[in-house]
Image (spheres, rainbow, N blue to C red):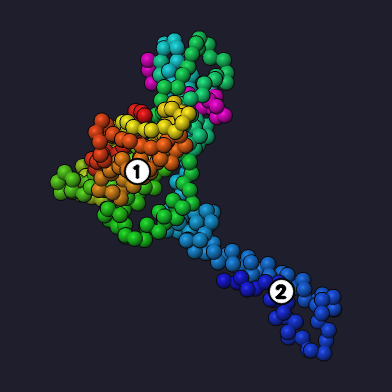
Amino acid sequence: MFEDKTFDTIMDEMLSTVDQSIDTRQGSVIYDAVAPVAAELAQAYIDLDMLLSETFADTASYYYLIKRAAEHGIFVKAGTPAVLKVLVSPTTLEITTGTEFNVGELNYTITENLGSGYFSMTCEETGTAGNNTTDDVIPMENVDGLETIDIVGIITAGTDDEDVETLRNRYFDSFSSASFGGNQAEYKEKVDAYAEVTACKVYPAWNGGGTVKLAILGTDYRAAAASVISMIQGAIDPTQDGSGVGIAPIGHIVTVATVTETSVAVACGITYSLGYAWADIKDTVTAKITEYLLNLRATWEDAVSLVVRTGQIESLLLGITGVADVTSITLNGTAGNLEIPATNVPIAGEISG
């Protein structure tokens, strides 16, 4: 808005008001007197332009977007720590809660004894970096009797802080439909506010009048953990008797559920470039297909159902170095696209070539 308010422009405007009989050339008394003022004014206009950008949600930076969204009851989703499942030997060993271990560059603490040698271990930092299941688990203090400890899975995947564009989209989405009195928009707004939830679908009257089903996705747009479902159920409708104890209004009986994951086995018929074989491109192919399915799951909230398309996968494969041609693709042993039921989301299964 103030792009034309440069130092030179301001100087010209100021010097044009000086009597023509007075010397205004560079180095003159008048020029040297007004130049510092023009420099300050030019900087002030730059600051005003930045302030104007921060005023509107579509151009605001992260810090000021957080403040703008908060005015409308939209709060940034803070990152969550990863919770890993580990197996120790001997399986009868008792490890004290709070005992610290190191995995890669991050530290974890034992948070629960799950029985039969299994323990939950929570990362001390939030973010997806804590979802590390490949590095060794190293004790940071002496643990008497411990022989081995290995990661066997992820109980709850860690998440990063909500990024600026996702927050911006949530803010603008809040204006597209008014949330009020237990309508679909309100349920979505309340559930989507949880950091552990990446998507939510509302099914009104799914089991008769007054019933509401909330289907949610957890981290990475996969099935939500049981602990997350329980937490949201407790906040929305803990009694499920229409009494209106939670967020749900009187008369609503709300059931919080998640989706079923459909494993998609992908068999690729590939003609390799000279010098290449499946072993050379397997990791790249797996990463590409896994990312494609992740992006597909991200559309679940607004889609009636999802379709895994062989054409999309073929296009991805043809962009990989070492692939000369793609002769066939089957999904779960069948040629053609794979339609995923509305209550399911696809995840990568066995990928072969």
In the picture shown, does residue 239 fall above or below 72? above
- Name the residue rendered at 73%, 86% in the picture: 17
Is the N terminus in the top left, top right, bottom left or bottom right quadrant?
bottom right
* Image quadrant assignment for residue 118: top left
- Name the residue rendered at 81%, 82% in the picture: 24
80 or 347: nearer the eye?
347
- Name the residue rendered at 67%, 71% in the picture: 6
In the picture shown, does residue 267 fall above or below 68? above
Q: Which residue is mark 1?
A: 312
Q: Work out whether mark 2 precedes mark 1 in sequence or the reverse, and give the earlier one.
A: 2
Q: Which residue is mark 2?
A: 8
Mark yes or no: residue 34 visible.
yes
Describe residue 29's horizontal placement relative to residue 69 as left or right. Answer: right
User: What amino acid type is highlighted by mark number 1?
Assistant: Gln
User: What amino acid type is highlighted by mark number 2?
Assistant: Asp
Residue at the limit of the structure toward the front, as seen here? 274
Q: How many angstroms separate mark 2 from mark 1 (CA)?
A: 54 Å
The stretch in magenta equals 102-116
* Residue 236 magenta: no
Is the C terminus in the top left, top right, bottom left or bottom right quadrant?
top left
Describe residue 195's horizontal placement relative to residue 51 as left or right. Answer: left
Residue at disc 1, secondary structure: helix
Mark yes or no: residue 248 visible.
no
Q: Could you say where residue 148 lies in the image, as x and y percent from the top left?
A: 48, 13
Residue at the limit of the structure toward the left, as seen here? 208
96 or 351: nearer the eye?
351
In the picture shown, does residue 30 fall above or below 307? below
- Name the residue rendered at 48%, 17% in the picture: 149
